[in-house]
Amino acid sequence: MTATGEAKLRDEIAGFGSFLTGQSLAHGSTGNISVRLDDGWLITPTNSRLGRLDPARIARLDQDGRLVAGDPPSKEAFLHRCVYEMRPSARAIVHLHSTHSVAVSCLAGIDADDVLPPLTAYYVMRVGSLPLIPYFPPGDERLAAAVRQVAARHAAVLLANHGPVVAGGSLDAAVGAVEELEATAKLFLLLQGRALRPLTAAEVAELETRFPRS
Ligand SMILES: [Zn+2]
């Protein structure tokens, strides 16, 4: 990775941080964004607002998660690290405390193997399936172990009473998937108490054949 290449990625993280905040998907200092480099990764700093990131201060970590440049990383960096370890194809990760996804993660009686039904084709194409990770307090390493268990099979997971973690083949893809997840969580909440007609297993299978997710 050249210095120019890294600078471009720093700008991209700050740009998407601002975009996600503008979409009301990140409030306060919640949420974090990372991008994989050849020899480590970049991640938003601890206590930073996604809408006001200084690209030069974004943390750069080595392969083992040690800080090599920028401000100290998000306290949730360990979540990103275990997803990168389990998903070699992941180039970027977005974690948010976005309202509708968090609301769904607080519902009793949801399917922990796959939280949201396949309501639309775009949800199937961009997210697919969404396991629920049990609740652990912030920073608890047991959360990493639980994420590690499912991350190889799922690009997106939902942390109970907390929020989504979504990996993608690019930052643009990860952001697109988390937006789709949030929109589907909103639909799911709007439809509570009504009879649902999600896509059938055959309709989902056809989409997965025609539009395989990376
Ligand atoms: Zn969080």
Image (spheres, rainbow, N blue to C red):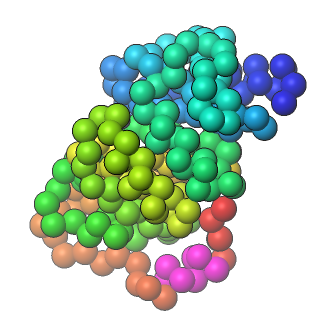
Instruction: Residue at 19% x, 76% y: name it.
Output: 195
Q: Position of residue 23 (x, y in %)?
A: 43, 32
Q: Position of residue 211 (x, y in %)?
A: 65, 71
Residue at the limit of the structure toward the bottom, as seen here: 202
Q: Position of residue 21 (x, y in %)?
A: 43, 26
The quarter of the picture where the N terminus appears is: top right
Q: State whether the magenta stretch is mostly helix, strand or loop.
A: helix
Instruction: Residue at 33% x, 56% y: name it.
Output: 133
Instruction: Residue at 40% x, 62% y: name it.
Output: 130
Q: Quadrant of ligand 1?
A: top left
Q: Position of residue 111 (x, y in %)?
A: 26, 69
Q: Tell me, yes or no, whether the highlighted magenta stretch contains residue 163.
A: no
Q: Is residue 149 visible?
A: yes
On the picture, is 120 further left or further right than 113? right
Q: Is residue 12 visible?
A: no
Quadrant of res 31: top left
The residue lying toward the viewer, choosing from 81 and 116, is 81
Looking at the rendered structure, the number of numbered marks drawn on it comes to 0
Instruction: Residue at 67% x, 36% y: name it.
Output: 63
Please determine whether, in this image, residue 110 is positioned above or below residue 158: below
Please determine whether, in this image, residue 97 is positioned above or below residue 203: above
Q: What's the magenta region? A: 203-209
Q: Tell me, yes or no, whether the highlighted magenta stretch contains residue 204.
A: yes
Residue at the limit of the structure toward the right, as seen here: 2
